[in-house]
Amino acid sequence: MDENLSSYKNNYITTLRDDIVSIISEKLTPAAEKYGYSDSPLEENVKWKPKVLLLGNYSSGKSTLVNDFLGGNIQRTGQAPTDDTFTVIAYKEAEDQSDEIRVIEEREGRSVLNDPEYPFVGLKKHGDRFLAHFRLKFVNSPFLKQLVIIDTPGMLDSVTETDRGYNYQDVIGELAQNSDLVLLLFDPHKTATGNEAHTSIRETLPKKCFEDRILFVLNRVDECTSLEDFLQVYGTLCWNLSQMTGRKDIPQIYFTYSPHVANHDANSADSEKFFIQKIENQRELLKAAVLKAPHYQLDHLADFLDTHCERLHHLLEVFIQYKKKMNGNRNRFIFFMTAFSILLGLAAGGAGFMNGLGDLVFTLTISAGVAVGTIFIGMLIVFPYFRNRFHEELLGNLDTLTKKKHQNRIDSWNAVKQSVVEYLTESRQNLSLRKLRKEFSMLQEVMEIEMPEVREGLQQLNRIE
Ligand SMILES: Nc1nc2c(ncn2[C@@H]2O[C@H](COP(=O)(O)OP(=O)(O)OP(=O)(O)O)[C@@H](O)[C@H]2O)c(=O)[nH]1
Ligand SMILES: [Mg+2]
């Protein structure tokens, strides 16, 4: 792609990303925070550059891959479990003119996780031990201009949660959820057999991210001793993956090795490793797929906008129904209370008149007094009691407030029900129908006007590529 087209494309992506983020922050976040759907701004985790998360067994070559991509010796590598740190690697220009790729600045976990400028504040909940295993490096590699890489500690076979001092699965689950692309690395020695790998693939990742965001990589293939060995490894990996993911088809697996550290004698035609020349090292292909992360992020953001808008819309719809029912019950109460008060007033006045307690004026005064008094007592004492009963009744039958026509509606209702219950329990009836309708129609507008524009923007981008 020529340079002009590439910079046009990058600008296009950045503008579209900013547009989506501002729709989220201006139109979704206020309602999300107000009604307890989210504790923090929705855009908090998605506002930064696209994130590429590297996961895999220890020594599967994650850090070597990072160094290869960046073009410098940035991450520590080694045969034993080498690195027990989550390292976010982002771009920063060097101040001097030197082209050497290096770490320009490094920040400790505590300062990064407390800085709202970065989308990692939510990770603080994983505790102090985790903070000590998190850092941010700024590197002057052009590879990072449009994306951010997260290198992670390797998955181990027998480690328990207490050994690490934080819940590894929770951490990688959260990171995967907020990443735009996940690279899952295996090597010929460990084809998804370890304990942590098993849990990650079988439980954590499927819950937290769509499969189309995961790239499977069989790394260090130069270490297979022969073609048979390679086929054996590939077969075992496919088998293990199908057992764990439940998929019947075989996902695309990138075969790669690092040309910088590969130590093979494949050049001589009689070497057993000659096969390696026949297998394309898909490192460049993988690199090209990783460089598409900004595009994945846009898809991710569009889905994010779509999902949260639909859920908030559903939440407001239920609040509106709740409020309408409460108002209906209140109006009925007022109607019956007024009728009852008038009847009581008339009865009291009539009884007084019949017993000769006064003239007509006196009778009317008594009637009006009793009627007004009854209404007053009714509204002040009886109404709050009935209002609470209506409220409790509706709270117990929330499902009746929403039509669940199809699976999508059932899913979104399941996602918001807890927030609805909590908000209604805490705020009681302090909802304004006027405000709710205004917020509801704003979300409707996002769904009907802005969302299709975003999708159209994405299609345009596909046409550029
Ligand atoms: N032969 C060969 N060796 C590799 C390849 N990639 C990495 N290595 C070596 O494998 C060892 C482990 O590589 P690392 O990059 O540290 O692996 P890692 O996945 O980051 O490991 P942890 O940080 O411990 O989880 C190092 O000695 C690398 O030199 C490869 O493609 N081929
Ligand atoms: Mg490493």
Image (spheres, rainbow, N blue to C red):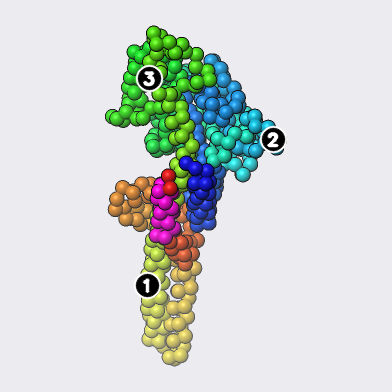
Contact? badges 2 and 1 (CB < 8 Å): no
Where residue 341 sits, quadrant-wise, is: bottom left
* Span colored in magenta: 446-463
**C-alpha separation, residue under disc 2 versus residue under disc 1:** 84 Å
**C-alpha separation, residue under disc 3 versus residue under disc 1:** 87 Å
Residue behind mark 3 = 278
Which circle, 2 or 1, is nearer the viewer?
2
Mark 3 or mark 1, earlier in chain: 3
Amino acid type at circle 1 is: Phe
User: For the residue carrying disc 2, how many other residues have a C-alpha within 10 Å: few (<14), some (14-19), or many (20+)?
Assistant: few
Q: Give the x, y percent position of residue 400.
A: 33, 55
Q: Give the x, y percent position of residue 423.
A: 48, 53
Q: 406 left or right of 144?
A: left
Residue behind mark 1 = 336
Contact? badges 3 and 1 (CB < 8 Å): no
From the Cβ of disc 1, is ligand 1 less than 8 Å away? no
Identify the residue at horizontal 49%, vertical 68% (top origin): 380
- The stretch drawn in magenta includes residue 99: no
Q: Report the predominant secondary structure element of the magenta stretch.
A: helix
User: For the residue carrying disc 1, how many other residues have a C-alpha within 10 Å: few (<14), some (14-19), or many (20+)?
Assistant: few
Q: 275 left or right of 47?
A: left
Residue behind mark 2 = 97
Tag 1 secondary structure: helix
Identify the residue at horizontal 46%, vertical 90% (top origin): 361
Q: Is residue 115 visible in the rendered structure shown here? A: yes
- The stretch drawn in magenta includes residue 453: yes
